[in-house]
Image (cartoon, rainbow, N blue to C red):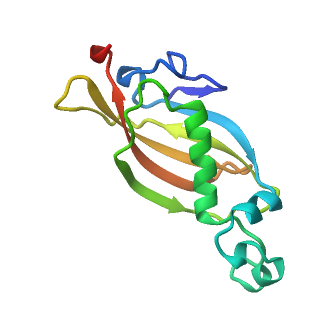
Amino acid sequence: MDIHQGTDGFTAPIDEPYFEDHTAGATYEYGIVAVTQELITGFAPQSVHIDTVEAKQRPFGGLVASGLHTVARMLRLFARHCLSTVKSLGGPGVDELRRLKPVRPGDQLHLRLRTPGDRLPCSDPRRGIVRALAELIDRSGEPVPRVTGVNLLRTRYSA
């Protein structure tokens, strides 16, 4: 399994990866998200994510980021480091989304992206489908959220 770290792990720069540049079985790790109380409360859709007194009475025993906030942070890292602004044709959906652990103020997370090998050609030779597993990883190396996403990408044939 290949692991690529840094701002560019693909065989082509971020604005150039075509469908064919996504290596089956590769793992890419990027970025750091430092989670602060201000970030959590600034995004929060519910009072349990804003009010520290109320949060202590809830099952997690303290302030935690909303699941949507955590996934939004993951998607921002994905867009910054992995998503070609030129070759991406959009994402038709997400096959699975799991929130595995709570995210708290002080946590530091990074993105891990795996391409398990699901590169599927479309009926149109100008496009291909790449299925990827994206996770935010905490300091202990455990995934916090996990998303299996599907992206449509231009092929070299389209160039």
Picture coordinates of residue 91, whole percent (x, y): 38, 42
Answer with left or right where residue 91 lies relative to residue 142: left
Which quadrant of the rendered structure holds the C terminus? Answer: top left
Answer with left or right where residue 149 lies relative to residue 71: left
Q: Nearer the viewer, residue 19 or 47?
A: 47
Q: Is residue 126 above or below residue 64?
A: above
Picture coordinates of residue 2, whole percent (x, y): 52, 26
The part of the image, by quadrant, that contains residue 88 is top left
Task: Give the residue drawn at x 56%, y 37%.
Answer: 79
Picture coordinates of residue 122, whole percent (x, y): 21, 32
Q: Is residue 68 above or below residue 121?
A: below
Q: Nearer the viewer, residue 128 or 114?
A: 128
Q: Is residue 152 above or below residue 150?
A: above
Picture coordinates of residue 49, whole percent (x, y): 72, 72
Task: Give the residue drawn at x 52%, y 53%.
Answer: 146
Task: Give the residue drawn at x 70%, y 51%.
Answer: 138
- Looking at the rendered structure, the number of numbered marks drawn on it comes to 0
